[in-house]
Image (cartoon, rainbow, N blue to C red):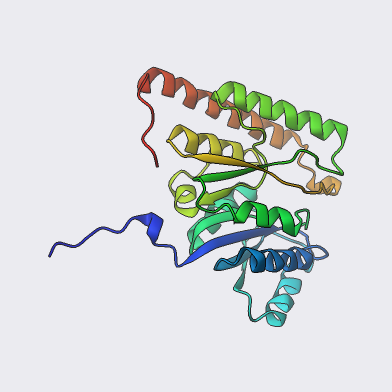
């Protein structure tokens, strides 16, 4: 009997891999992990959590190691990057380390309540990409809200899509992240990946959620020249893909992923 190939969609050992990236989050990472544990109890799926210390100079790793010892019933692993590799690189690398069919990033600064995690993760299987958006985001300045709205407008204009928000922590199929991994820097990688998946025929589902905005110290602020350059590069790549789609695919819709 001839051997049968196995779809990468069915090779996940567990339902969900959660990445928790941290850089100097010793005071907030444990509450984040406790929130994840409470949320996953409600969702009721099998899961693992991979905490990545992305070049912290504080006691983040030590705090996580102590939490691992105190929570033996939680599938939790710690990985230390050799240096600060950035969020996009950490996101892609960890997708290859995970075992879940689905994959999601949860920031290590404890800005996401349990209800939001439940609302997003309970939609597993409803679409290829579950995209959260925030009708309100307490703590975010008027300037940051304006920048966020401008970014969403530009992504929609350049890509031809019409999502409400691109910088939330979406839920993906892990194989799709590995297959269509974004090669850029900054938080704009989420918009790059989401639009790329939509270009390839992925289905999406938006879900309204709540959250909080935590203002980083000046050394960690995303409002830097480097990040603005990175964002501009991301927008350019999104626009180029739309041009290719129009010129070379024409009226032929992409095949479903």
* Residue 171 place in picture, x, y as percent: 58, 50
Which residue is drawn at the image coordinates 83% and 49% (left, top)? 214
Q: What's the residue at 61%, 66% (across, down)? A: 49
Horizontal and vertical percent for residue 105? 63, 54
User: In the drawing, does residue 168 fall left or right of residue 109?
Assistant: left
Compared to 95, does 128 lie above or below? above
Q: Residue 213, can we see it?
A: yes
Residue at (65, 81) in percent of width and height: 72
| Res 256 → quadrant | top left
Relative to 154, 94 lies left or right? left
Q: Could you tell me residue 136's position as x and y percent?
A: 80, 40
190 versus 92 height, above or below: above
Task: Give the x, y percent position of residue 16.
Answer: 54, 61
Q: Quadrant of residue 61?
A: bottom right
Quadrant occupied by the C terminus: top left
Is residue 108 visible in this depiction of the protein?
A: no
């Amino acid at each position: 009997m001839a051997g049968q190939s196995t779809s990468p969609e069915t090779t996940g050992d567990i339902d969900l891999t959660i990445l928790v990236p941290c850089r100097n989050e010793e005071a907030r990472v444990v509450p984040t992990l406790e929130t994840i544990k409470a949320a996953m109890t409600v969702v009721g799926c099998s899961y693992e959590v991979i905490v990545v210390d992305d070049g912290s100079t504080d006691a983040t790793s030590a705090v996580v190691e102590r939490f691992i010892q105190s929570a033996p019933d939680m599938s939790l692993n710690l990985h230390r990057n050799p240096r600060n590799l950035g969020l996009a690189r950490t996101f892609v690398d960890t997708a290859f380390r995970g075992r879940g069919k689905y994959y999601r990033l949860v920031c290590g600064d404890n800005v996401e309540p349990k209800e939001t995690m439940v609302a997003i993760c309970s939609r597993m299987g409803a679409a290829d990409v579950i995209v959260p958006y925030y009708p309100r985001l307490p703590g975010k300045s008027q300037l940051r809200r304006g920048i966020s709205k401008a970014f969403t407008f530009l992504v929609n204009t350049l890509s031809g899509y019409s999502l409400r928000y691109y910088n939330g922590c979406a839920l993906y199929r892990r194989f799709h992240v590995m297959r269509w991994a974004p090669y850029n820097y900054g938080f704009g990688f989420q918009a790059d990946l989401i639009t790329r998946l939509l270009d390839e025929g992925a289905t999406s589902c938006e879900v309204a959620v709540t959250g909080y905005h935590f203002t980083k110290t000046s050394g960690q602020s995303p409002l830097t020249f480097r990040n603005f350059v990175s964002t501009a590069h991301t927008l350019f790549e999104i626009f180029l893909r739309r041009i290719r789609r129009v010129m070379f695919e024409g009226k032929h819709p992409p095949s479903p992923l």
